[in-house]
Amino acid sequence: MNGMSSGWQARAIQIGSVAALFLLWDFVGERKLINAILLPAPRAVFWKFVALAQTSALYTHLFVTLMELVLGFLIAAAAGLSLGYFIGRSRYGTMVFEPLLAGVFAVPIVIFLPIFLLFFGIGPSSKIAFGATYAFFPIVLNTIGGISQVDDRYVRVARAMGADDMQMFRRVLLPAALPVIVTGLRIGCIIGFLSIIGSEMIAGIEGLGSQIVRLGEAMNTAEMFAYILFVIFFAIILNTGLSHLQARFAIPGDGR
């Protein structure tokens, strides 16, 4: 009961914080404390959002961004899970490659965006490759961590019972490491989405990010904020869905 009460309290605080932010925004807009060109009133943004939702332009750009995200995530997941599994099976490989990959991940990969543009062009291919690169690291690192931390006793018992490599993977390694791996997939998907939006804003001709920049340059800030709100709502939906998926694979008793 206390857990339910705490959950409702947390939800109320979250909703109240968002409501307070919108009330402050509305107050600033109504009092014209900031130029409407720089910060349009929430009502203007809302009606732009409603009008935008009835046009095909929004969904065209959404489709481009979603396509880039799905393809980038699939590439990152395939590479990250495969490499993470093979590295995680070896203590020596984990000792050598895990710090190396973590060190590379600490480098702001956005500085290499011009290289992606040179190799893949300004179209969706560069955004897919860039998003896949960013998403790859949390996936491979979590996979290494999950596989390498499986209790050796389980492995020895399975071997003693005659388990082959495939049975070892399906019956022992994967179930034990799955919660950590799913966490890596969730983080990778979110980071991939953010990197794709960012790359579209820096060098894109299609997608939600490119539209935000184009509208900002044209000083059409009400519609720009409508796109920003749409991206925020989409990110919330994506994160909520992935969080529920992650919770299904949570380790019993870990508090989630």
Image (cartoon, rainbow, N blue to C red):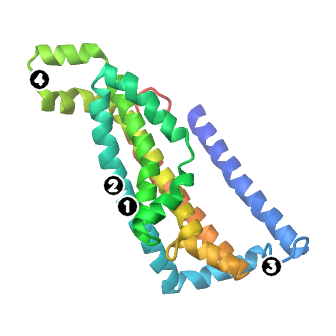
The span from disc 3 to disc 1 (Cα, nearest Å) is 35 Å
The circle on residue 74 is 2
The disc at residue 70 is 1
**Label 2, label 4: how far apart the Cα atoms are:** 30 Å
Q: CA distance from mark 1 to mark 2?
A: 6 Å
Which residue, given by chain and number where applicable, does mark 3 sit on? 37
Neighbour tally class for label 2: few under 14, some 14-19, many 20 plus, Cα within 10 Å: some
Please give left or right for residue 154 compared with residue 190 in the image: left
Q: Secondary structure at mark 4?
A: loop
Q: Amino acid at mark 2?
A: Leu
The Cα atoms of the two marked residues, 2 and 3, are separated by: 40 Å
Quadrant in the rendering for residue 100 = top left
> Disc 3 to disc 4, how far (Cα)?
67 Å
Upstream in sequence: badge 3 or badge 4: 3
x and y percentages locating residue 4 in the rendered image: 57, 38
Say which amino acid is labelled 4. Ala
Residue 72, above or below 1: below
The image shows residue 114 at horizontal and vertical percentages of: 52, 61
Does the CB distance between marks 1 and 2 fall below 8 Å? yes
